[in-house]
Image (cartoon, rainbow, N blue to C red):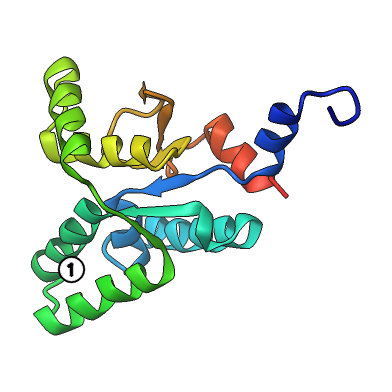
Amino acid sequence: MTEGKPLSVVARVAAPLRIAVDTNVLAYAEGAGDAVRVARARQLLRELTAVGGVERLRLPTQVCGELYNVLRRRMGWPGEQAARAVLSWTDALEVAEAPWPVFQAALELSSAHGLQVWDALIVSTAVQQRCHMLLSEDLQDGFTWRGVTVVNPFAAQPHPLLRAALLQL
């Protein structure tokens, strides 16, 4: 016990919250979207890495594939340029792979809650990575499954989990 608190409470407070990042956040950071969202995504990623380091952020492999498609189709980037951008994110953030049990959990989540299977795979991967939060504009803000809460980083009022992550030292 530290100062009257169980060690598990102290460790939970001291360890930076793990956060999974969805495609839209990275796509905006790459310039795909309106100026407000682009600036917000870039600022948010800078702040989160400054507070807890890049090791707190997780990049599901599904997001890598989706980001490549967004950069190619919506942004019109050549394949080589889009691939370089995706690989730069995989160099900067910890890539979270989705083995078969994670995909099985995604199927369960999809059928139980009506999510697209690919979105469910991102959530399921975040669970497997022991994330507390998934930053996503596409999923329902506040939706929680197996300890992961979806947080819309572009909402007018920041979610309490996001505020806590940004204040965490």
Picture quadrant where residue 75 is located: bottom left
Q: Crowdedness of circle 1 by 10 Å Cα count: few (<14), some, many (20+)?
A: many
Q: Is residue 46 left or right of residue 164?
A: left
Q: Is residue 169 above or below residue 119?
A: below
Q: Is residue 67 left or right of residue 4?
A: left
Q: Is residue 140 above or below residue 48?
A: above
Q: Which three-letter amino acid code belongs to the residue tagged 1? A: Leu
Name the one closer to the observer, 49 or 7: 7
Residue 27, percent across and down? Answer: 28, 61
Name the one closer to the observer, 113 or 99: 99
Residue 3, percent across and down? Answer: 91, 28
Q: Residue at x 16, y 59 (%)?
A: 65
Residue 4, percent across and down? Answer: 89, 22
Name the one closer to the observer, 47 or 55: 55
Residue 51, percent across and down? Answer: 65, 56
Q: Residue at x 37, y 64 (%)?
A: 29
Q: Residue furthest top?
A: 112
Q: Residue furthest right?
A: 3
Q: Residue at x 62, y 55 (%)?
A: 52
Q: Residue at x 14, y 77 (%)?
A: 77
Is residue 161 visible in the rendered image? The answer is: yes
Is residue 34 visible in the rendered image? The answer is: no
Picture quadrant where residue 118 is located: top left
Q: Is residue 121 left or right of residue 95?
A: left
**Badge 1 element:** helix
Name the one closer to the observer, 114 or 58: 58
Q: Is residue 143 left or right of residue 11?
A: left
Q: Quadrant of the N terminus?
A: top right
Tell me the residue that label 1 is attached to.
71
